[in-house]
Amino acid sequence: MRDRAGRELDTAILDIDGTLVDSVYEHTVAWSRAFRDVGVAVPGHTLHRAIGMGAERLVAHVAGDAVERAMGDRIRAIHDAEFGRLGARVRLLPGADRVIGELKRRGLAVVVATSGNERDTERALDAVPDSALLDAVVTGDEAERGKPAPDLLDAALARVGGRRAVVVGDSPWDARAGRERDLLVICVLTGGFGAAELTGAGADVVCASLVELLERTDTTAWASADLGGGGRSALV
């Protein structure tokens, strides 16, 4: 596989929530309950659009710096407890049962890099059949800044000694992190964000699901010619 400039890729960096597992709306509900419990009104649609962002910045992003200073840690703790109860409902997304193995067979090191905490990440990966094939897992507990900062991607590449990666995610935060490091970014629509929003945030390619992504890897190297000479393409 090659990136938009035709450079050989050696690493695939996968997100979890909305990419491998169908957990975006459980996170939205958990955050909604957390804000409600502290008496702060944040609409559900606003929270949904923040899912995938690092938890350390989400509270300020949706409710302001004053709320973060006053009760940010409390809100995050309530969210974690609520998601701990809701997370048992989470299911695999189409293609998640084979994407790791398929990318490995194409010669890539495969790393999960998620803004989620270690506990939730382990539980999600327990449901992914090929997770034992992962070369590394990097969680939000291991980076000072979550997405859209590129810290998690930097840590993922460092963990496996990679140089050029394809980032596979579902949110604008994944796309922004990847573009900041000039990495190839492929986004799927299974997180509930629209194709135009994802490409606007920096995604090179948008696929309907991991199933389509895998189908595309059989017919293209994701090279610059396939992306219109370095442009972006919504493949939905």
Image (cartoon, rainbow, N blue to C red):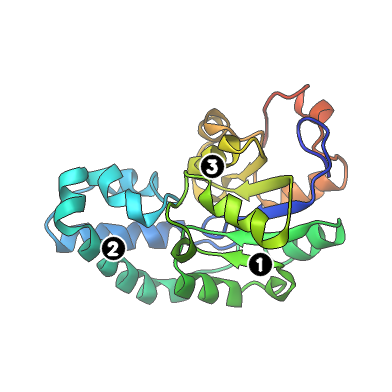
Disc 2 to disc 3: CB gap under 8 Å: no
The crowding category of the residue bearing disc 3, from other C-alpha atoms within 10 Å (few below 14, some 14 to 19, many at least 20), is many
The crowding category of the residue bearing disc 1, from other C-alpha atoms within 10 Å (few below 14, some 14 to 19, many at least 20), is some
**Which of the two residues, 13 or 200, is positioned nearer the viewer here?**
13
User: Can you see residue 135?
Assistant: yes
The crowding category of the residue bearing disc 2, from other C-alpha atoms within 10 Å (few below 14, some 14 to 19, many at least 20), is many
* Type of the residue with mark 2: Arg
* Type of the residue with mark 1: Ala
Q: As displayed, is residue 90 above or below residue 103?
A: below
> Spatial distance from mark 3 to mark 1, Cα to Cα?
19 Å
Determine the residue positioned at 26% across, 46% down: 60
Q: Quadrant of the N terminus?
A: top right
Q: Is residue 214 left or right of residue 41?
A: right
Q: As displayed, is residue 200 above or below residue 218?
A: above
Q: Percent position (x, y) of residue 165?
A: 71, 47
Q: Mark 1 vs mark 2: which is more N-terminal? A: 2
Between marks 2 and 3 in the image, the one whose residue lies nearer the viewer: 3
Q: As displayed, is residue 236 above or below residue 188?
A: above
Q: Which mark is residue 136?
A: 1
Q: Percent position (x, y) of residue 203?
A: 61, 35
Q: Is residue 13 left or right of residue 35?
A: right
> Spatial distance from mark 2 to mark 3, Cα to Cα?
22 Å
Determine the residue positioned at 42% across, 49% down: 53
Q: Which mark is residue 177?
A: 3
Q: Quadrant of the C terminus?
A: top right
The image quadrant that residue 103 belongs to is bottom right
* Type of the residue with mark 3: Ala
Residue beneath label 2, please?
A: 76
The image quadrant that residue 86 belongs to is bottom left
